[in-house]
Each structure stands twice: as structure tokens, then as C-alpha cells.
Image (spheres, rainbow, N blue to C red):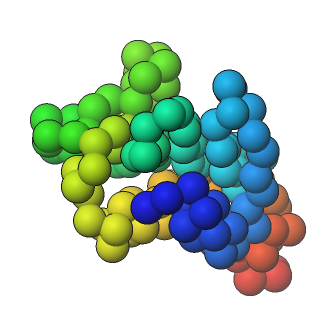
Amino acid sequence: MDRDEFNRFCNGLTATSHVVQWGGADVWKVGGKVFAVAGWSDRDHAGISFKVTPLSFEILKEQDGLRPAPYLASRGMTWIQSHAPGALTEDDLQAYLERSHAIIAAGLSKKKQRELGLLPEA
């Protein structure tokens, strides 16, 4: 997944916003909370970080090309970074990004979720 594909995919999720920060990383948020980060360097492959469930974290952190996301996981958060080509298929990466979006969105207040169109109006 290249930069344009990553940004296009994240932009297609509900109620997202995008900023470039942290040394040129593409940072995607839902309700002001980060759900995906892609750091681009001189390499062709980005380091793409996303939130996962505790069980997924335990499984994925041991897989080749995946690791606990720098800075985030060291603070006790369950974030994984895909840092090598082929670590995840594009379909799997997209599924993890969608799940990360859902995990972060679920942590927002119900009021905020409704405002963002993530829940039906009460």
C-alpha cells in the first residue's frame, strides 16, 4: 500500500480527518483521536501503525514484518506497526485499519459518535 492508497483508504472511512505531523507522517483521526499513522521515509514501504485488540497485539507482535508500534506500544498501548513489505496482505491491512477506526470510534462518547454519524440519531 503506497501513500496515496493509504490516504485514500483512510479518507473513505466514516468521520475521519487527516493531518501531517511527527516528521511528515500521515496521521488519521476519528473524533480527534488517532487510529492510523503512516511514516514515510526514503524507503518504498511505510511504517503503518494501527490500534488492535489485546489478543491481536499478542499474536501480531511476533509475526515477521510486524512489531509493537514505536512510542505507542512502549506506553502500554496495543498498537502494531507493519514495517516490511508483505507483512500483511493489502486486504488484511485494510481490515486492521477498519478495525482500528472502529476501536477508536467506540471509545468516543455516544454524543460524539452521533455527531459524527457513527451512531444513529437518538
* Residue at 26% in and 65% down: 89
* Residue at 67% in and 50% down: 28
* Residue at 74% in and 83% down: 120
Q: Residue furthest right?
A: 115
Number of marks in the image? 0
Q: Where is residue 55, by image quadrant?
A: top left
Is 100 on the left or on the right of 117, as rendered? Answer: left
User: Is there any visible trace of residue 106 in the rendered image?
Assistant: no
Which quadrant does the C terminus fall into? bottom right
Residue 118, x across and y down, in percent: 70, 73
User: Is there any visible trace of residue 12 in the rendered image?
Assistant: yes
Q: Where is residue 110, by image quadrant?
A: bottom right
Residue 73, x across and y down, in percent: 40, 25
Residue 54, x across and y down, in percent: 30, 41
Q: Where is residue 1, by image quadrant?
A: bottom left
Residue 31, x across and y down, in percent: 76, 53
Q: Which of 121/76 is in front?
A: 76
Is 67 on the left or on the right of 75, as rendered? Answer: left
Q: Is residue 99 above or below residue 82?
A: below
* Residue at 68% in and 25% down: 23
Is 98 on the left or on the right of 105, as rendered? Answer: left
Q: Which of 66/43 is in front?
A: 43
